[in-house]
Image (spheres, rainbow, N blue to C red):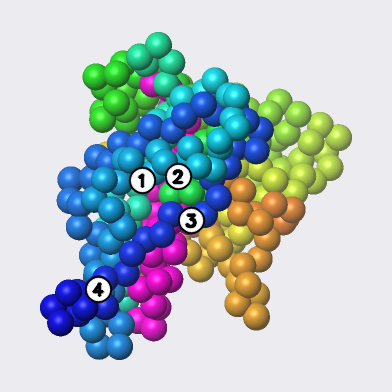
């Protein structure tokens, strides 16, 4: 009876998503489980606590077998290393809704050195009605997506010595121009990569009104450029992120770059509940907006649902913490 009850109160994470490398670039995937706490957490379902767990304690072998089975005929040369850093269920406050914090990164390994490729660091929010299987499926999807996206992404930053793999953040930060240059280069940035490298698009410029407020972005022919096709800009030494509701000032603290906003503003939905636009590196393509949101006013509105939304230092993706 105890064995049956235990099985009923556990939801296994099935790694059954496809992680086939369609271009055949990858020879192997090596998995490192570097979580400080191996317990993921529980979900309350039908008034019972259900533990979310991987089907095996040997997660390294399971993931590497998963890749091998999906890529039996691969003739690639790349060795991808996947580092699972955090995977934890927690309750959001004050609602008590469950949420899933995930942090997982990938690297290209060459000659005993690692080159950063990709990272997923985010919080997935669920409702009290969410099933354990919905949470376990989301975990599997996050891992599969990170692996698939890593096949074709180009590495960034300096090589990371093998002994520094768990300290990759600080090693990479020293090599990125964005975090080692002051003042920042003025101009309009087409994407996060160009911002990270402080390489503005010389064909674009900001346009101000009589009050010296930036109202739009234009090209050399002074024709308006769709704002949301761009990442942001630096004006008078201040960086701004282009968002669906305006130009938000980018701040910096010990954790990195951030804007003060929330999911509702950055991922707006239409009346049917569908997200508007296509999220691409922290932006929604094809929307023309304008106006700089008053930063000081927004700073004072944290108690109204706004909070720090970080911008991943390496990928430029939004990192939600709630």
Magenta includes 79?
A: no
Residue at image mark 1: 62
- The stretch of residues the image draws in magenta is 114-142
Name which of mark 1 and mark 3 comes first in the sequence. 3
Helix, strand, or loop for circle 2? Answer: helix
Residue at (51% x, 68% y) in the render: 264
Helix, strand, or loop for circle 4? Answer: helix
Q: CA distance from mark 1 to mark 3?
A: 11 Å
**Residue 4 position (above or below residue 209):** below
Determine whether label 1 and label 4 are within 8 Å by CB: no
Q: CA distance from mark 1 to mark 4?
A: 20 Å
Residue at (30% x, 36% y) in the render: 32
Q: Position of residue 209 (x, y in %)?
A: 69, 49
Residue occupying the far top of the picture: 111
Determine whether label 2 and label 1 are within 8 Å by CB: yes
Residue at image mark 3: 16
Name which of mark 3 and mark 2 comes first in the sequence. 3
Q: Position of residue 217 (x, y in %)?
A: 71, 43
Left or right of 185 on screen, residue 313: left
Q: CA distance from mark 3 to mark 2?
A: 8 Å
Residue at image mark 4: 7
Helix, strand, or loop for circle 1? Answer: helix
Q: How many residues crowd around disc 2 within 10 Å: few (fewer than 14), some, or many (20 or more)?
A: some
Residue at (59% x, 30% y) in the render: 74
Residue at (69% x, 52% y) in the render: 285
């Amino acid at each position: 009876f105890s064995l049956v009850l235990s099985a009923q109160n556990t939801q296994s994470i099935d790694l059954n998503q496809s992680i086939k490398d369609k271009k055949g670039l990858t020879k192997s995937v090596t998995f490192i489980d570097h979580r400080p706490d191996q317990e993921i957490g529980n979900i309350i379902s039908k008034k019972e606590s259900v533990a979310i767990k991987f089907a095996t304690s040997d997660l390294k072998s399971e993931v590497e077998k998963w890749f091998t089975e999906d890529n039996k005929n691969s003739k690639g040369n790349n060795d991808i290393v996947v580092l699972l850093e955090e995977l934890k269920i927690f309750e959001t406050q004050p609602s008590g809704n469950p949420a899933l914090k995930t942090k997982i990164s990938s690297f290209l390994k060459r000659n005993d050195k690692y080159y950063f490729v990709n990272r997923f660091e985010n919080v997935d929010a669920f409702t009290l009605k969410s099933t354990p299987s919905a949470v376990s499926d989301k975990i599997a999807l996050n891992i599969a997506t990170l692996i698939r996206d890593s096949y074709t992404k180009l590495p960034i930053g300096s090589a990371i010595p093998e002994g520094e793999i768990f300290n990759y953040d600080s090693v990479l930060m020293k090599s990125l121009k964005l975090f080692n240059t002051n003042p920042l280069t003025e101009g309009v940035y087409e994407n996060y990569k160009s911002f990270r490298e402080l390489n503005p698009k010389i064909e674009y410029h900001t346009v101000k009104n009589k009050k010296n407020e930036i109202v739009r972005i234009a090209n050399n022919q002074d024709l308006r450029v769709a704002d949301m096709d761009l990442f942001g800009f630096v004006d008078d030494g201040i960086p701004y992120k282009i968002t669906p509701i305006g130009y938000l000032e980018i701040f910096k603290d010990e954790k990195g770059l951030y804007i003060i906003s929330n999911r509702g503003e950055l991922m707006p939905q239409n009346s049917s509940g569908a997200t508007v636009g296509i999220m691409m590196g922290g932006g929604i393509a094809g929307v023309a907006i304008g106006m700089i949101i008053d930063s000081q006013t927004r700073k004072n509105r944290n108690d109204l649902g706004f909070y720090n939304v970080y911008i991943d230092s390496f990928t430029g993706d939004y990192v939600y913490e709630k």
